[in-house]
Image: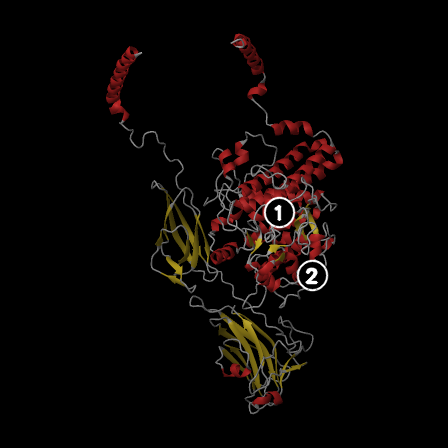
Amino acid sequence: MKHKLNALKNTISSVLALLAIIFVVSCEEAFDFDLPDTGSIADLTLPQANFSYTPNPENFKIVKFTNESNESTNYLWDFGEGVVCEKDANGVIVCGTESTSTDKDVEFVKFDAGEGDYEVILTALDANQASGTNTQMVAIRDVFVPITPIVDNGDMEVGFTPSWKINAFTGGTTSTVNTSSDGAPFFYDGTEAPGKTKGMKFAAGTSNPANPGSRRYAYQALIVSPTTPDRTVKYVIEYMYAIKVAATPGSNITVQILDGHFDDGADALASTPLAESVASELNGKGNFITVKKEFTSNASGEIAIWIFGDTDQDAYIDNVKVYPKP
Amino acid sequence: MKYLKNIKYLIVALTGMMLISCDADEFLNPLPDTAIAADGFFQSDEDVLAGIYGIYDAIQGVNENTESSNSSFNRGVQFEYLLTEHRSDNTRSATLEGSRADFHRYVTDANNIQSEDYYQSMYEIIFRANSIINYVAAANAENIAKYTAEAKFLRAYAYFNLIRLYGSDNDAIGGVPLVTAVAESNEDELLFTRVPKSVVYAQIVADLQEAIANLDNSYKARASKAAAQGILAKVYLSQPTPNYSGAKGLCEDIIADGSFSLQTNFNDVFYNEMNSEVMFVIRYEFAEPNESQGFSSEFTSFIRQGRQDGLNIVNLNLVDAFNANGGNRTAVSYIAFGDDAELIDSETGLPAPEDAEVAKFLPQGTDFTNPDFPYGTNARLAGNDWIVLRYADVLLMHVEAIMAGTGNANTTDALSSFNAVRNRAGLADDADGVITQDELLLERRVELAFENQRFFDLLRFGVADAVLSAHSVENGYSFSARDLLLPIPSREVNLSKGLLNQNPGY
């Protein structure tokens, strides 16, 4: 047994020696690693850049860009004339001066020059720095459609509560102006009526500045599209009126567009209106004249119609409309 | 060793068998099982009719509580709320665990099992419908046109769902694969090429027009003329270039026909099945493992009945919409429990439950005064039908068609349809006589809440990006406009050998 083991020992040593030689010889090859690229395959799915864009509902000059690229991780936007903006803590969009971005999506980009076609380039890159680009002409168009407010009971056909009533009146009356069957011989849409329609009447007793406690006012709140730093919105108030010939010259109906909504008639009266139209021609009962007065909406879009008389004979008003300036 | 002696005989025998069986073609060219089955199956009118019922089975889907395996079970319409309501601002999952909780946070990926199941379910409907169209000659002559129209109606229904959830507007990416004939499994080009959205819509329109021409109003749980008209109206409103006058005409045909009417009591819409308001419904049977549905139980959370912790949980934002405009629909639509039911908005003083649950599909036997079985004894095998289309939806689509993208409608017809829905809910007529787009969207939201309409409404009205961006910011989700499309399921992309494009961002 001992002898056998010795023989075995020899064998083992020889084998070990042989192995060591092989190992040393082969070492060069064994540790001769392949170059990094050998055996790897080329990336055949390269980045494809693509994007879509939608205008901001509040401001047509501001555009939101959504990345629709494939096979990519890094992005470079070039907005050309557009500058990148951000929403601050108060929700106000603040614009910088940069016209490039490496964000995936860019929510606010402002094209200050307004309507036009602007070139925007998106480059999409993957981790191997392979890239794809997509260039689009971004069309900026102002498709703003101003609100057309509906004047409630503008044809004066039914009672004036609540349509033409002010809620409260410190030092005055909240009673509505009188209804009348002597309105304009025209329907609200401007077509001729077979006879008189109903209207609103300012009588001597309700239209005397010397007696403010019984003077009556017609009030109606409206909402129009606001004027913003980027857009001026113009409206027209239109109405028809008639004043009895016998009235003292200077008698009139005043139609104002108030800057805001008011609860108390005293505040309305004290406010500075956005626009005022004084109708004073003594054209005679039934001889209605159409008046149009242009005004610019305010920043809140909250306005009100405010009508009152200063006359010693009956004066009539009918078919009051407010619409965007054509 | 003794056995080894015989091994040579065995080898000879096996070799012989191999040689013999190699002769047969089918060993190397096995035909797909489906092809073999279909070829032999359709022999008579009854067989074709059974095949048509099979299409409805594909929509109905298999209850998760009957077959609980997560993979490759056709759930039909039973997961649809995850892909639609959860992705709108209406509802969410109670937990953040599992793939069902990915939809409401906009983190659904291409491996999502529920999305994959829905995609496959819709194609299952399409393949079964194509099969009927192919083998319809076996039916009685007088039924051929009718059966074909019914199959095409169902095919259009499935494509309409697919194109809205998965189809890109970008023709370079494509809509969805359009298969309109029985396809062999090796027809990769046909099965996996996404054709442009407009082409898919043209097929949907053609199929529904054929259904309208050949069907009558005999059924609610099967295809009918009115259902085809109503769905076609929605297709017209949804397609890339809307056909408003076409949609208006179809809605007016349904209204003038007079076969359908609003239920007086909103509760009866859901708990008096097959009522006069229902136009197309997927039926389920209570306590029948193979004919029941699992979603009713998944909508529970406070006293949990389902397999999950609660799905379709009502967002506070939707509660606010109900407070403003719900009328008597609120109590029927959702319910809050425990302390949650006592929560009040500090500014408005109105109810503000944070974890309210859907109440439109409470399982049979629900009795909240019963402490042991508040949802009955078999909530997981619920029988509540799934309403695909009802008359109130048609009335509101009528208003939408008259509005025709202008942002408002004030015609007598529009107001009549709009106010009918409002009055049934116990609300007054539209206050100023002008229906704005926002008012219509809000009305649809509360009328059709939890009926898988909201997500598609937002898309159709062109406000999905704006509304869901705001919703996502409010709740800390990660919505981007890319999330308006679901990913094409990875399994499909892999099977397509590179033919099937993925949607951007996935």
Which of the two residues, A39 or B371, is positioned nearer the viewer here?
B371
For disc 1, the neighbor class at 10 Å (few under 14, some 14 to 19, many from 20) is many
User: Residue at label 2?
Assistant: B424
Q: Does the residue at mark 1 contact the one at mark 2 (Cβ under 8 Å)? A: no
Find residue B117 and report its horizontal and vertical position in percent: 57, 40
Q: Amino acid at mark 2?
A: Arg
Which of the two residues, A318 or A209, is positioned nearer the viewer here?
A209
Direction from residue A226 to residue A167 in the image, left or right: right
Find residue B445 and report its horizontal and vertical position in percent: 60, 57
On the question of residue B436 being in view, the answer is no
Residue B360 higher or lower than B198, as above or below: below
For disc 2, the neighbor class at 10 Å (few under 14, some 14 to 19, many from 20) is some
Local SS, label 2: helix
Residue B295 tag number: 1
Local SS, label 1: helix
How many labels sit on residues? 2
Which subunit holds the residue at mark 2? B
Q: Amino acid at mark 1?
A: Phe
Q: Quadrant of residue A27?
A: top left
For the residues labelled 1 and 2, the Cα–Cα distance comes to 27 Å
Q: Which is more N-terminal, label 2 or label 1?
A: 1
On the question of residue A291 being in view, the answer is yes
Find residue B241 and report its horizontal and vertical position in percent: 56, 50
Farthest front residue in view: A2
Which subunit holds the residue at mark 1? B
